[in-house]
Image (tube, rainbow, N blue to C red):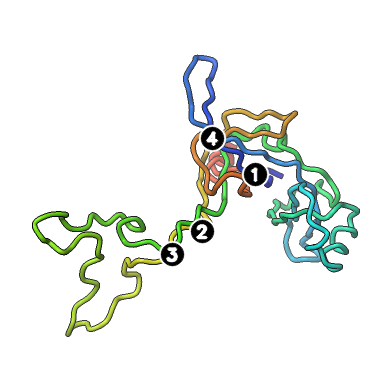
């Protein structure tokens, strides 16, 4: 299985053997535990349900959730997500621990997270509008301007860029290069930025581009 759940620690710099510096994001990738194993014969598809090993509050854990975890003999965890598997990857079983070393032979990854919420924003911050001039009494500074015709078409077209809620969306950044893996601390360093704030959860998967190239070379 070429995927794991991680938590964003922050950004720093990393130097390679030639002294070149790279901006990297530090991610605590695991440890995770396999909470459930789904199989094509019973569930219609191959997948694993992974849980990031972080204790879940007993006050927020009802009997149904406890039973789900007790079935495989693991403690309830806070964050659980599902990863699809190839049909050939049948060695993963419920209760098994997954650590960052599953990405040892992976060069690039796709990382999914929830972007930082910005609240309600205008068109300049949300869509990059330039706005009007600030002087000579223009009276047009940060407004969106015209949004449609009056008599024709007499309506606003769907998809028109308007003020609204910004951020807080599911975002995937693809093809990020793995710079370093520190296995004893379950740390993963990837080049560039990833979605979300510090301590936000991330889904880390082997890059689809890398998988296609590997299949083509085979």
- Of 59 and 161, which appears nearest the observer? 59
Residue 164 horizontal side relative to residue 95, left or right: left
Task: Give the labeled residue for mark 2.
Answer: 168
* CA neighbours of label 2 inside 10 A, class few (<14), some (14 to 19), many (20+): some
| Residue displayed at 31% across by 69% down | 160
User: Where 152 falls versus 103 (above or below)?
Assistant: below
Check contact, mark 4 vs mark 2: CB within 8 A: no
Point out the tag, 4 or 3, that comes first from the N-terminus.
4
Mark carried by residue 165: 3
| Residue displayed at 65% across by 44% down | 7
Q: Secondary structure at mark 3?
A: strand
Check contact, mark 4 vs mark 1: CB within 8 A: no
Check contact, mark 1 vs mark 3: CB within 8 A: no
Mark 1 and mark 2: Cα distance apart in space = 17 Å
* CA neighbours of label 4 inside 10 A, class few (<14), some (14 to 19), many (20+): some
Mark 4 and mark 2: Cα distance apart in space = 20 Å
Picture coordinates of residue 216 (x, y %)?
55, 40
Mark 4 and mark 1: Cα distance apart in space = 12 Å
* CA neighbours of label 3 inside 10 A, class few (<14), some (14 to 19), many (20+): few
Which residue appears farthest toward the left when viewing the image? Answer: 136
Task: Give the labeled residue for mark 4.
Answer: 11
Picture coordinates of residue 105 (x, y %)?
66, 32
Q: In the rendered image, which quarter contains the C terminus? A: top right
Task: Give the labeled residue for mark 1.
Answer: 7
Check contact, mark 3 vs mark 2: CB within 8 A: yes
Residue 152 horizontal side relative to residue 26, left or right: left
- Of 203 and 143, which appears nearest the observer? 143
Mark 4 and mark 3: Cα distance apart in space = 26 Å
Picture coordinates of residue 177 (x, y %)?
53, 34
Q: Secondary structure at mark 4?
A: strand
Specify the quadrant of the image occupied by residue 48.
Answer: bottom right
Picture coordinates of residue 86 (x, y %)?
70, 51
């Amino acid at each position: 299985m070429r995927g794991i759940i991680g938590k964003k620690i922050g950004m720093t710099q990393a130097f390679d053997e030639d002294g070149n510096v790279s901006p990297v994001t530090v991610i605590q990738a695991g440890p995770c535990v396999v909470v459930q194993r789904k199989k094509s014969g019973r569930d219609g598809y191959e997948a694993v349900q992974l849980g990031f090993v972080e204790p879940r509050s007993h006050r927020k854990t009802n009997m149904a959730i406890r039973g789900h975890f007790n079935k495989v003999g693991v403690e309830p965890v806070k964050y659980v997500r599902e990863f699809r598997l190839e049909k050939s990857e049948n060695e993963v079983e419920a209760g098994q621990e997954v650590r960052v070393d599953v990405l040892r032979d992976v060069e690039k990854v796709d990382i999914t997270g929830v972007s930082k919420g910005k609240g309600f924003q205008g068109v300049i911050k949300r869509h990059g509008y330039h706005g009007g001039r600030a002087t000579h009494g223009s009276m047009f500074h940060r407004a969106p301007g015209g949004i449609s015709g009056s008599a024709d078409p007499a309506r606003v077209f769907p998809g028109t860029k308007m003020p609204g809620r910004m951020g807080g969306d599911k975002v995937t950044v693809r093809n990020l290069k793995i710079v370093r893996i520190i296995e004893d601390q379950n740390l993963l360093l990837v080049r560039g930025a990833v979605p979300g704030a510090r301590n936000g959860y991330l889904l880390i998967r082997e890059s689809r581009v890398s998988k296609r190239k590997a299949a083509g070379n085979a």
